[in-house]
Image: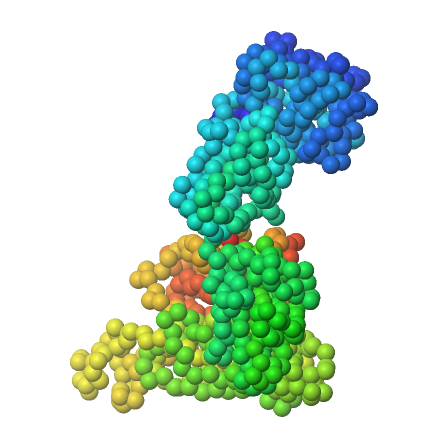
Amino acid sequence: MRTFSGTRWQRVFGLGLLLLALAVAGNIPVIAAGPPANDDIANARVFSSLPTGDIFSIEQATLAPGDPDASCDVIGPDKTVWYRYTPAASEAVRFNATVNGTLFRYLAVFSGAPGSLTEVACAAHQASTSLSVALTGGVTYYLLVAAADGTSYEITLYAERIAQAANDDFDSATVIGSLPFNAPVADNGSVAPDDPPGCSYMANTLWFRYTAPSSGLVQFDLRDGLPWEIDRSAITIFSGTRGSLVFRDCGAGTGGLPVTFPASAGETYHIMVTGFFGSATFHAERIELPPNDSLTSARTIAPLPFQHRVYIQGATADSSDPAPACTAPPNQTVWYRYAATSAQPLTLDVVSPGKAVIGVWSGTPSSLTPVACTVKDDPSLSFTPVPGQTYFIMVGGSDLLGSLTVNAWTPVQGPPILCPASYELETVWEGALLSKQTPVVVQPFVLTEYDHAALVVWSAAGHPEAGCPLSSSYLCGLPDQLHEQFRVFLNTVEVGFMPDQGNHVWGRIPDIILGILPPQPYTVTLRWEGPAGVDESVGYRVGLCLAPAPRPTEEPTEPATETPTEQPTEPVTETPTEQPTEPPTEPPTEPPTEPPTEPPTQPPSGICPAGYTQNTQWVNTLILNSSPRVDLSFAAPGGKNILLAIASMVGHPEAGCPGGSSWLCSLPDQTNEQFHVYLDGSEVAFIPDHGDHNWQTFPPITLGGLGGGTHVLTFQHEGPADGFPDSSVTFEAGICIEN
């Protein structure tokens, strides 16, 4: 806890020296057996001067019948000891308590007299806590140290004066001017006697003031702090004036922050920040409402297939919104409008940062009839519209952070194929892989120029070839299957893996970046994977995306002559016009952007995309015949969308390549340096071999909202058993959490 200026260890060391000096001077008593002398408030130990402290055992302390409860502890204490302090002049004092163990309860400061006490401030924590209070000169205050049964450890208590933060008092609040706004939160705030109660216990308070220039959503947050700082902090919003404040909203801890508040033009708001601070920053920003925030401004779903990404964190819910039948009314909603021109079933699919609802109504905004509803992580539903009828679709949730994506299509169109930025859609292949009839599909294509190439791959499990999920075919009634996955190959090299999606829902994998392809014929092969079964099947929709690429500079612009000395560095065959100078024997290996002249020797940094923060990172090497597998665990926060970002480097990096002089570095690039990635035993990605001793970053893999808890990622090298003993690949992986 921050008791002194300087680093944490400097403060702890300084506290120890000071307590030692106080003990030598006789200001700290020797620990004695039996209940402490100040076990009862009537015998409270007096702090006559500051700084001072105490080291004592609370094991034999008792709870007196008149000992008060405190607001920061709902369980109540089992043991208490008391201190008394009367400041000669008004000042801010910090009380700090640490226990060599657990089961500590809280610190609380009261004014008044025994039997008629008024709580001033309170702070609770199991192992240690700090409480800063603004005290009035001449007023007597009582400090209560409370513990639970089982606390048999020594408690170290320390009291000191502190210099109050500039915005420690309501009247000296920091003014929030233009947004966005950032300000560090000091660790020397204190609780004033008339500070109003917030939505968390009152430990240390700081004040900010904001006058809204216009109406709209404003978000208040604490950022950049250590987890324990945020978890033990709160933001409370008031309107009104000192002495007559009106509570408006609040949020506490990692589950309650940030607080998004609808501010009214011209109104002044007072923001009280409470907690224990070290490195946190107070942040305020304006949140723009999505254009389709209300039912009357619903966005039209057209043309199909349709896709729309919306910042759901800035959405609100109107009191006039209809209540969905499948869940409680959400506090964030956006609206869509669909005018049916046929009876083709419409599928709605939402990629969301947490549990979301899709609700469908028919009619008019003033007269709606419920049609369908679902709520879950990444929800999806289908319904059969009536031609000529208009439908209103609610997509929403409660306290969702970030953005969500809404997809809509009918069986005629299938899901939308959206190419990566700067790519254009060349062609779309669609159909179904049937386990016993057509388990393999080969799609040829020809390039006439050098192109960057990528594949966008969707799949739908559950017999889509029979028209599911809406057809009456008997296939649709069969349970979801476990073997509706397939692999994707460019020529003969695997470049992607589509895991089983289940639930008759279209899903996609991250875009497959193929790199720069020279002009020649190619094939894309989709191969169903699983044991032989009756009617096992999976639908697919694959888009080929291209972007122009520069012609290699080493390729001659004119065919070589028959004179050897006049030929380019790379000689050609007798028919140079029929073959490029360097015909590829394998699919291209370059990434979609030009590689650096000198390959980097360190893993890339910042592999998480914009809007995400990396909270876990690994760098590891898979060696085919010695250590081909590694299991890595991570803790997933609840209510957050999670991505897995991966970069890999082939060419024996474990031997120091590309900068090392090992003979391994001189070996040719290998074709078996690919690996598979599994989440809790289920495959989620396939990273292909790409050669060239270069780091390449791959599109992030969406893991979704995992609901918290610990999960395991497995990275498994793949190659022939008779491969090079040193066949290897180094990877960097990062867990990315949506902001």
Is residue 207 visible in the rendered image? The answer is yes
Indicate the quadrant where residue 142 lies: top right
Is residue 624 visible in the rendered image? The answer is no
Of 599 and 369, which appears nearest the observer? Answer: 369
Indicate the quadrant where residue 508 lies: bottom right
Residue 58, horizontal then vertical, whole percent: 75, 23
At x 37% / y 57%, what residue is drawn? 600
The image quadrant where one finds the N terminus is top right
Of 125 and 372, which appears nearest the observer? Answer: 372
At x 41% / y 59%, what residue is drawn? 657
Image side of residue 575 versus residue 703, left or right: left
Residue 45, horizontal then vertical, whole percent: 69, 14
Of 735 and 4, which appears nearest the observer? Answer: 4
Would you place residue 606 above or below residue 561 in this image?
Answer: above
Of 236 and 734, which appears nearest the observer? Answer: 236
Indicate the quadrant where residue 545 lies: bottom left
Residue 503, horizontal then vertical, whole percent: 66, 74
Q: What is the residue that sits farthest to the right in this orientation?
A: 65
At x 29% / y 80%, what residue is drawn? 581
Residue 665, horizontal then vertical, whole percent: 40, 62
